[in-house]
Image: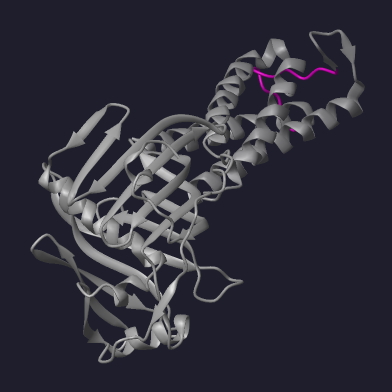
Amino acid sequence: MIKILAIVAIVIVTLHGLIHLMGLIAYWPLGKLAELPYKTTLLDGRWEIGAAGTRLFSLVWLLAGLGFLMAALGLGLGRSWWAPVLLGASLLSLMLCILDWRAAFRGVWINVAILLGLLVVFGLRARPAPFAHFAAPTSAVQTMIPPSGLPAPVERFYHLVYGDQIPVYHSAVLTGRGTVRTMGITFPARMRFSHVAGQAYRHYMETNFYGIPIMKVNEWYLEGHGRLELPFGTVEKDPCVDSAGNQGLWAESLVFPAIFLTDPRVRWEPLDENNAYLYVPYGESEQVFTIRFDAQTGLLTHFETDRCRDAKVGALRWWGDVVYDKNQFGRPRYLSATWEDEGTPWLVFELEEIVFNADLSEYIRQKGP
């Protein structure tokens, strides 16, 4: 649906831009157009601008037209600059149509419609304020020696990031902002993911419009069972949700990957020189991830697994990417998640704060941030 709307918008904006080129032809003038008869006055004859002013007026029509065409091109190519370019072109066009009301009044309503659409676009681009710092007492982080016999890319990764001492994290609170796609619309969001390492999590997310929360989601994975409190209902006691919740638990743990060595239930198996299998516990069984390590940096950059999306669709390939902080080697900065039938991330999470080893025994069962 969103793709169809984008195509419709591209067509409308392109046609609107081409129509503006008629202003150049009529008012330079380069030809005669019945729809735009040549004149040297604006505001229905109230403002005399002369031949030179009319020629300048025609160039402004050209500028607006080129702006619309550029915006349509940017939208088609998926460039973010299309929106401010379209805003400028629409405002310029609106001014032109008001000045030449008798001949161009229809353009006013087209521009108003475009500006209303842009009002939504910019609202979906406005980044929300960050959550307040997670203030809670924390315990000291102990360390352990990494185990031997790890697959080569796994051993290289942990040596690069942690050296010969692996931190032991009992809990982690991940706070940040990003985007969440729901019902085909990508919303700016702020998020707080709280983990009892390898055991449970609580997600709190707010999607926003102009920084105002419009949808709040509380989600838990406790004692092997998932529960989602959504604005349109609660989902629980669902084997698909439970299975997916466990995979979400371990996928998010890639932000603090020490847990994959410190938790004795987790095991690694070799695949090739840049990939390995990660087996994580799920009840009495296991779930497996394929983990990719960058050949140049040695860092863990990608995961894949089969994950249950819902009872109707069943399991789909689900993957994510980890992007690291440019100023701090080995510190994850972005985490994304993608379903194979969508092809682009439905979630992008920018990690802004991480707090380790806080007591979450009560907090993880609460609601809100």
- Residue 87: x percent and y percent? 65, 34
Closer-to-camera residue (166/155): 166
Residue shown at 44%/47% (left/top)?
192
* Prevailing secondary structure of the magenta residues: loop
- Based on the displayed image, in which of its 4 quarters is residue 343 positioned? bottom left
Q: Quadrant of the N terminus?
A: top left
Question: Is 85 left or right of 356, judged from the image as shown?
Answer: right
Residue 250 counted in the magenta span: no
Q: Which residues are magenta?
A: 29-40
Q: Is residue 97 above or below residue 218?
A: above
- Residue 287: x percent and y percent? 16, 65
Residue shown at 36%/64% (left/top)?
170
Q: Is residue 195 above or below residue 209?
A: below
Question: Is 30 left or right of 346, judged from the image as shown?
Answer: right
Q: What is the total number of numbered labels drawn onto the structure image?
A: 0
- Based on the displayed image, in which of its 4 quarters is residue 56 positioned? top right
* Residue 208 showing in the rendered view: yes
